[in-house]
Image (cartoon, grey):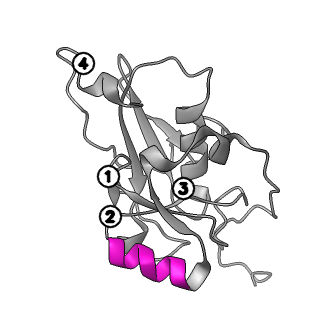
């Protein structure tokens, strides 16, 4: 339903995922995306040469489910946690199609801005392992409702990757 425009976009082809760079800025927070821990999202819009970047999957889903969002979405990609080096190091190119990803929803995982995160996987067994360890249920994108992503959330302290300084924990 949400990406139905992809099939009806006429000559528009579904773009491939972009590679995240140190210069990419989050659409909703205007911060450098790579400075945040946890999975991220990219949204490709018709007529745009570059994707919109999001510092967390939650932020990307908020954009997708927002009633104000009217642009034609060609593709959405999220980081695959199952192949990421670590929560602190998602990498720059491990993107999977958001439509086919499985999401662990309601776990104790916090995204880059400290909000509860929707944790994407391409592998169901890895999603089940994560859910067993960290809580939450496994849902597909179409099962994640606007109410799940548009409700106010408590943000814990923003989680930023360590820069290797003396005061690091």
Q: Earlier in the sequence, mark 3 or mark 2?
A: 3
Q: Residue at x 44, y 44 (%)?
A: 142
**Mark 3 nearby-residue class (10 Å; few <14, some 14–19, many ≥20):** many
- Mark nearer the N terminus (4 vs 1): 4
- Residue 59 among those drawn in magenta: no
Q: Which residue is mark 3?
A: 34
- 73 vs 55, left or right, is left
> Which SS class for mark 4?
loop
61 over 48 or under it: above or below: below
Q: CA distance from mark 1 to mark 2?
A: 7 Å
Residue sitting at 73 percent across and 60 percent down?
A: 114
Considering the image in quadrants, where does the N terminus appear? top left
How far apart marks 2 and 4 lie (CA) works out to: 26 Å
Helix, strand or loop at label 1? It is loop
Tell me if mark 1 has few (under 14), some (14-19) or many (20+) residues whose alpha carbon lies within 10 angstroms of its own.
some
- The stretch in magenta equals 124-132
Residue ID for mark 4: 8
Q: CA distance from mark 3 to mark 2?
A: 21 Å
Residue at x-position 34% and y-position 71%: 124
Q: Nearer the viewer, residue 76 or 87?
A: 76
What residue is shown with label 1? 100
Most common secondary structure along the magenta stretch: helix
> Which disc, if any, is residue 122?
2
């Amino acid at each position: 339903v949400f990406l139905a425009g992809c099939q009806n976009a006429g000559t528009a082809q579904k773009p491939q995922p972009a590679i995240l760079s140190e210069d990419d800025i989050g659409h909703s927070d205007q911060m450098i995306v790579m400075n945040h821990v946890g999975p991220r999202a990219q949204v490709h819009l018709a007529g745009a040469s570059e994707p919109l970047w999001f510092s967390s999957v939650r932020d990307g889903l908020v954009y997708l489910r927002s009633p104000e969002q009217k642009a034609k979405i060609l593709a959405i990609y999220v980081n695959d946690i199952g192949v990421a080096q670590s929560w602190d190091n998602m990498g720059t190119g491990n993107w999977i199609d958001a439509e086919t990803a499985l999401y662990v929803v309601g776990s104790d995982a916090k995204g880059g801005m400290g909000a509860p995160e929707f944790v994407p996987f391409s592998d169901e067994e890895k999603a089940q392992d994560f859910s067993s360890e960290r809580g939450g249920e496994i849902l597909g994108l179409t099962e994640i409702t606007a109410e799940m992503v548009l409700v106010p959330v408590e943000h814990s302290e923003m989680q930023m990757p360590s820069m290797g300084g003396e005061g690091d924990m």
